[in-house]
Amino acid sequence: MVFSSLIFLFIFLTLNLIVYFCADAKSQNKIMLIFSLIFYAWGGPRYLLLLVGETLISWFCALKIEEARQRGEQDRQVRRYLVLECVVLLGLLCIFKYLGFMLGNINKLTGFPSKVPNIVLPIGISFYTFQLISYVADVYLRKTSAQPVFWKLLLYSSLFHQCIAGPIVRYETVANEIDNRRITSNDIYMGIRQFSVGLAKKAVLANSCASAADTLLPAGVKSLSMQSTAGMWLGMIFYMLQIYLDFSAYSDMAIGMGRMIGFHYNKNFDYPYIAHSVQDFWRRWHMSLSSFFRDYVYIPLGGSRCSTMKYVRNMVVVWFLTGLWHGASWNYIFWGLWYLFFLLLERFVIQDRFPKAVSHLYTLIVVLFGWVIFKFENLGELSVVFKGMFGIGTSGFVNMNVKTVFLKYIFFLIFAIIAVTPLGKNIRKRMLVEGRQSKAMFTFANILDMVTPAILVVISALALVGASYNPFLYFQF
């Protein structure tokens, strides 16, 4: 079950909110836990045991850390529980996510093993593994207290808002809200608004961009070789828009659903495509993941307060792991190292020497080619597209198919470009400011605020029902 499905929107979420708000305060956490476990089991009941088991280990380790500290044990003895947590959880992550990849590469080099196992990846394992590690690490670092009640920690790790697609929520962010949530009417409205914006991003814009990208960049080396240079550029621009709209949409929906019931998750995306450097891009992109690697890998290794060689080493470790976290394939590792190269280039060579407009264009080009690496797990396809974008090995500069796709999706392209900028947000802010001086503007802005979520949900539902019912498709050339 995914957030952008009719069964989730009109059955699961609707039923969850009805039951939740009809229950007394003491029962609401248990209701959220039951719904979260059902949600997770929907994608594979057998892996629910893995989620529960990892949470149990984390609960045990955190309690043992606190007990050891209360007994006055030395830090080395306390640290063993953190080590146990990391070994078990990262070991399980490696088995499920990376073992097949590692054995596949060994097989290509040595012929052993003769058969590489096909291990099914449990849904959301990367997210809840990092959340639970951050929880135990924060208990060890005295940033938060251990949760004494197991099922409440399980609620944190399994909460369906963010369990399978992020953001990576730190326990300290929601520790107090697990037991002490105060929901205001503004929280409910803002939660609904952010959820509806995220839903429209995914159902209308991201899905349409994905359709255009898949049409222009068909799977297979032979098919890609038949595409034109303009088709590859346009396809990657659609993919660039799609992947931001996709990732940020799920974060928006998660943050919105959390806020509806009193959980305040931190922002995960901050318009990364308006960045003026690669470093700025990563301050704005998947902020919960970036902060995880910063706080639990980069800073413990020494951060930037060390020699140049150690700083480079720290960056190599972080960006190798960042790439590997996204998937068990060489292209993700190359993607991480691609950003490593430009981050080091900016620090040691570029150093803000470009004008603002040039910096922005340079950043967009770096990010666009980064998404080329990210998209194609097949290195043959990756090579074809990389060369094709420079006019090498394509069917020409442009063809009729590219023109047709462009005209068919031009309105989606325009709306998607607007959606990845803060233009809409800034217009709304301006209207609210003007509303303080104009009664007509105040009335208009408030009516627009009230009807926008409903309009977005209706448009999204129509898009999910099928393209033939999507009203935007009637505005085509």
Image (spheres, rainbow, N blue to C red):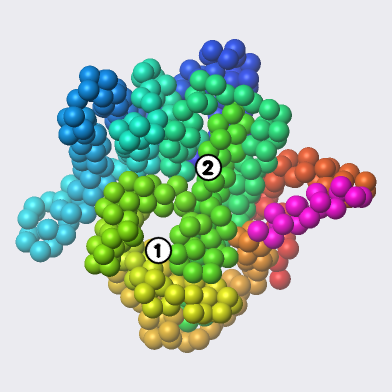
- Give the x, y percent position of residue 31: 51, 19
Q: Is residue 368 visible?
A: no
Q: Which residues are magenta?
A: 422-438
Task: Tell me the residue that label 2 is attached to.
Answer: 266
Q: Is residue 166 above or below residue 78?
A: below
230, 295: nearer the viewer: 295
Q: Which residue is mark 1?
A: 375
Q: Residues within 10 Å of mark 2 (few under 14, many from 20)?
A: some
Left or right of 437 in this view: 129? left
For discs 2 and 1, the disc positioned in front in the rendered view: 2
Residue drawn 48% across the image and 17% down it: 30
Callout 1 crowding tier (Cα within 10 Å): few <14, some 14–19, many ≥20: some
Q: Is residue 243 above or below residue 252?
A: below
* Placement of the C terminus among the 4 image quadrants: bottom right
Percent position (x, y) of residue 146?
36, 24
Q: Dot 2: what SS?
A: loop
Q: Nearer the viewer, residue 365 or 112?
A: 365
- The percent position of residue 135, horizontal first and vertical second, equals 36, 34
Q: Quadrant of residue 263?
A: top right
Residue occupying the point 68% across, 41% down: 193
What's the distance in space between the residues labelled 2 and 1, CA to CA? 27 Å
| Tags 2 and 1 touching, CB below 8 Å | no
Can see residue 357?
yes
Q: Residue placed at 56% from the left, 40% from the top?
A: 255
Left or right of 292, for residue 214: right
**Mark 2 or 1, nearer chain start:** 2
Say which amino acid is labelled 1. Lys
Residue beneath the point at 68% across and 50% down: 469
Whether the magenta-drawn stretch holds residue 429 is answered as: yes
Number of numbered discs visible in the structure rendering:
2
